Structures are given as C-alpha cells and as structure tokens.
Amino acid sequence: MSSTELMLALPTVDPVPWARSQMAFTLACHIILVPLGVSWAFMTLIANYRGIRRGDADALRLAQRWSTYMAVTFAVGAVTGTVLSFEFGLLWPRFMGQWGDAFGIPFAFEGLFFFTEAVFVSIYIFGWKRLKPWTHFATGIPIVIAGIFGSASVIAANAWMNAPSGFTLDSNGEIVEVDPLGVIFNDSMPLQATHMIIAAYVVGGFLVASVYAVGMLRGRRDRLHRLGFLIPFTVACVAIVPQMVVGDSLARWVYENQPAKFAALEMVPSTSSDVPETLLGHLNDDLTISGGLPIPGLASWLSDPSTGTATVVQGLESFPENARPTVSQVNVVHLAWDAMVGIGSLLFAIALWFGIYWVFRRDIPRTKWFLRIAACCGVLAVICMEAGWVVTEVGRQPWIVYNYMKVEDAATGNTGVWLTFIAVAVLYIALAVTTVLVLRMLSRRFRASEEASSVLASTPYGPRTDTAGEVDETPDLSTDVRQP
C-alpha cells in the first residue's frame, strides 16, 4: 500500500483499538506518577520529623529537597490525570452516557481530595522558613491523608467496573436510582484499593531509593545520600510484606468472582482439579498450551488452600467465546501475571535480605552488588505495577462493566480518534522529557548550592545567608528545630 493510500485508509479504521490503545498509553504513563503522589509526602514527613525531633540538619535538607521534587511530580500528575478524565468522555461516550451516574460518584470525591492535596502541598512548600517547625510539619499530614483517600476513590471507580453494584436499572437498561455508598464500597473495592495504595508505597519507596543507590554507586557516600536511600527503601521493604498477603487475597477474590479472568491469568484451557501453575508458556488458537514450566497442582492449591489440589478451576472452554478474553489477550494477561508475581517475589526476597541484615548489623549492606540490585528495584517495581494493571484491565475483557457492557459497545464511533492518540503521545513524550530535565536541573542546583554555601544557609528552619555570606534575619525563624 502506498503512503497516499495508507493516509486515505487511516480515517476509516476501527476506532475501538485506537481508543483502547490511547487509554492504555495514557494510563500507563500516569500510573508511574501515582505512587510518588501517594507515598512521597509520607517519606518527606519521615525525614521532616527526624530533622525536627533529633535536630538533624541533613534530614531537614532532604525533606526540603523532596518537597520540591514532590511538587514537580504532583503538577505533572495533575496534567496527565486531567487528560485521562477527558478521555472518558471522548473515547468512551456510550459508557459514560449509560453508566456515568454511577461511575462518576467516586471521581467526585477524588476531586475533593485532589484539591485538598493541592492546597496543602502549596502550604507545605512555601512554609519552609515561614512557619514554626512543628506547625510546618503538621501542614504535611493532610497531604498524606488526601493522597491515600484520593487514590482509594479512583480505585473505587475501577473496582466498580469489576464488581458493578449500587444502582437500579429500568426495563430499558437505564439507571434510575443510584446508591453512592453501594457504588463506592463495591465488593472489589476494599481489596483492590488496599492493594494499590500499598503498591504506591512499595513502588514509590523503591523508585526514590534507586536514585540514591545510583548516587552512592557513583561515590556519593555522604550522610544525605545514605538517609535518602535508607528512608524510602525501608518504607518499601516494610510495605511489601502486607502487599504479598493482600495480593494473594485479591487473586482468590478473582477466582471466586471473575472465573474467566482467573482462567486467563492462570492459562487454564479446560475445567479440572489439580491444575498446575504454568510459568511462562503461551496459549495456542486451539486452546492448547505450548512451552512453559508447569508446577503440578499449585494453581488449584493457591485458589483454595482448604481443598488443596482438589480445588476445581474453571477453564476458558466453559465460557462462551464472546464472553472471555481472546487467545492473544490470554497470553498478554498470563505473561503480565507471571511478571507481577515473579518481580513481586523478587522484591520481597530483597526486602527480606535487607531486613535481616539491618536487624543484625544496624546498617545497610555495604557491597556494591546490593547497591546495584537496589538501583534496579525502582524500575522493577514500576514494571511490576504496570503488569498488575494489565492483569486487571486486559483480564476483564471483553467487558468494560463486568457482565453488563462490552468494550466494543462503549467506545466512540469517531473514526478519526487515531489523531488524538498521536497528539496525546507527542504531548506525553514531551512532558516526560521535560519532567526528567527539570528534576535533574533541581538536583544539580541543590548539590551546587550545598557546595557553595554553609550548613547554616541550607538548614530549612535556620536564618538565611545571602551570596555575600551575610545572615538575613528576616523573617526571624532561627528557632531551634528541636523545639516542639
């Protein structure tokens, strides 16, 4: 096909794959910023608390740095999140037209938490050198709370798509009554929201710690870098322990409530007991499995330990072909499931290694290999989280609202939607490059200012020092940081 013929054909392409692709791309980009928006404020407050309570100037400088980085990622997250909000109406108008009365309720609460978070992020950032230490610390607490509840609100909307409830339909299938609490606290919400919120602390902790691990590998072994690594890495290691338990419970919920998705992620063609856990491999068009490493009986045992290998798992063949994921979708979901479980288990093992070493040595492992592994943990954690969302969203196919509406019936009919995909992709790439450049610029400026200034000048609650070395006593905030 010539380039001219291709350009003529593009406007008439099926809009559903383009709508799916655009939503997947924007969500995959936005989700990287979510853990930082939820967990970074908490880690900043840990450094802030340590600095005030112990008079630790390094911890205070670290908290001040993190608050600046946090503001940048929060602003970028607001942009990418806004694009996602518009996409619901632009890409899925039929879905919003029929289900918007219920689906929109959690987002109304998310908006309130978002604005609360934005207000207190501003107060916290501008409060350095302007508020008393403990007053300033207190302004950061609402950021943590709003981040958690805002994330829970968004996840409640997604969980509702997996377990729709809280509404009444008339004979035409239109919503005539909505129970807001029933929508928000649907059956999937408690486990799914808990899983994502804990994941935010795991991913955010490993991601921030990995930056400092790289710095330490480059020879920056000062106390600031040590604290910058230790605080987020510890948060991630602590969080991943309950995450393994919640993840197991959520998988069992899927087994009980979304059997077609469970058959896809475990790649089970036929209903049977003593089902093996197949690592890797792929499903063929005739529903046979090629390759992979089967572990006998493990999938049945994990589905319900009370009955062990006798647990029966429904296979893909037991569902109508138009009510289950396609073969290609099954392969994507199964690979994502293996990646999520495999990487999560690896991160848990690293956390266990770190925890045992800390208990006996009260220090981080000092080998370069540990720092190399820690430097990789950030990327691994992000991949693990992305894989989890692939399992959630692709595994639900062909449904956008489970058992009520299919994706193909929810998408826009606009055949020019490919143009918005290209525009959004260009915007997001430019935004990603700009964000990285801004964060690197801030990092260089912080290091340069510390090399050129005295310790007193860089103490957030101390008097300021100008470039000539003269102390600026206005405003007078030279109160001892240890003062409650």
Image (spheres, rainbow, N blue to C red):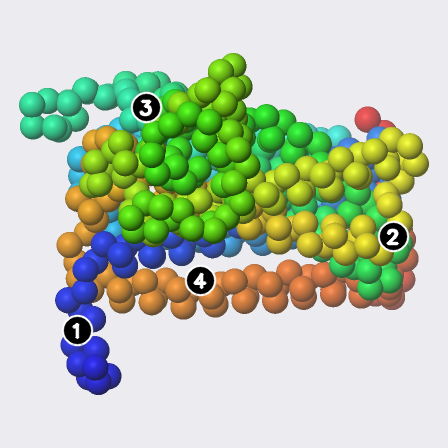
Q: Residue at x 10, y 22 (%)?
A: 170
- Measured as percent of width and height from the top left, residue 420 is found at 29, 63
Which mark is first along the chain, 2 or 3? 3
Helix, strand or loop at disc 2? loop
On residue 204, which mark appears? none
Instruction: Report the residue that reaches farthest toward the right.
Output: 361
Which mark is first along the chain, 1 or 3? 1
Depicted 333 relative to depicted 5: above or below = above
Quarter of the image that includes the N terminus: bottom left
- Measured as percent of width and height from the top left, residue 298 is found at 53, 30
As measured in the structure, the alpha-carbon distance from the residue carrying label 2 to the one carrying label 4 is 38 Å
- Measured as percent of width and height from the top left, residue 248 is found at 54, 28
On residue 428, which mark appears? 4
- Measured as percent of width and height from the top left, residue 362 is found at 90, 35
Depicted 181 relative to depicted 483: above or below = above
Residue, disc 2? 367
- In depth, the one of 265 and 367 nearer the eye is 265
Viewer-nearest of discs 2 and 4: 2
Helix, strand or loop at disc 4? helix
Three-letter residue code for mark 1: Ala
Three-letter residue code for mark 3: Val
Which mark is first along the chain, 1 or 2? 1
Residue, disc 3? 183
Helix, strand or loop at disc 1? helix
Instruction: Report the residue that reaches farthest toward the left.
Output: 171
Q: Residue at x 49, y 34 (%)?
A: 276
As measured in the structure, the alpha-carbon distance from the residue carrying label 3 to the one carrying label 1 is 42 Å
Helix, strand or loop at disc 3? helix
Q: Is residue 355 left or right of residue 222?
A: left
Viewer-nearest of discs 3 and 2: 2
